[in-house]
Amino acid sequence: MADVTILDQSEFLTFPTPNQAVTMAAVTYQAGILPPRTVYLDKAKLTDETLAAAIKNDIALAGKPTTRTLRIP
C-alpha cells in the first residue's frame, strides 16, 4: 500500500461521438519518488475505489523502465 497525495482534480468535456458529451475528471497525484502524474476518468464513474484502481494501474505502468543504457566504446 502506498500513500498517494492528490494534487489537483479538474473537469472537462469530451465528445467521443457527435452530440454525446462526457464529463471527464483529470486527477493529478504524486506517489513516492514518482513525479506528479495524471489519470483521466469518466466523472460519472468516479469513486474513491475507481480512482484508487486507476492510480494503482498507472503506478504499475510508470514503474516499468522505458529507458535503456547504450555503451559507447
Image: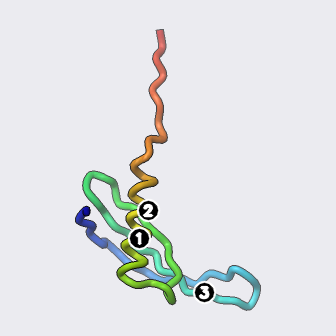
Q: Nearer the viewer, residue 41 or 72?
A: 41
Q: Residues within 10 Å of mark 2 (few under 14, many from 20)?
A: few
Q: Nearer the viewer, mark 2 or mark 3?
A: 2
- In the rendered image, residue 69, in percent from the top left (x then y), is placed at 45, 26
Tell me the element at label 2: helix
Amino acid at dot 1: Ala
Circle nearer the N terminus (2, 3): 3
Quadrant in which residue 13 is drawn: bottom right
Where residue 2 appears, as percent x and y from the top left, is 25, 62
In the image, farthest residue toward the top: 73
Which mark identifies residue 53? 1
Which residue sits at x=34%, y=55%? 35
Q: Give the labeled residue for mark 2.
A: 57
Mark 1 or mark 3: which is in front? 1
Q: Is residue 1 above or below residue 34?
A: below
Identify residue for label 3. Answer: 22
Q: Position of residue 54 (x, y in %)?
A: 44, 69
Q: Amino acid at mark 2?
A: Asn
As drawn, is 19 to the left or to the right of 34?
right
Tell me: residue 39, above or below residue 36.
Answer: below
Q: Earlier in the sequence, mark 1 or mark 3?
A: 3
Provide the secondary structure element on which disc 3 rests.
Answer: strand
**Foreground: 71 or 3?**
3
User: What's the distance in space between the residues labelled 1 and 2, CA to CA?
Assistant: 6 Å
Q: Is residue 70 left or right of residue 55?
A: right
Q: Are marks 1 and 2 in contact (CB under 8 Å)?
A: yes
* Residues packed near mark 1 inside 10 Å, few (<14), some (14 to 19) or many (20 plus): few
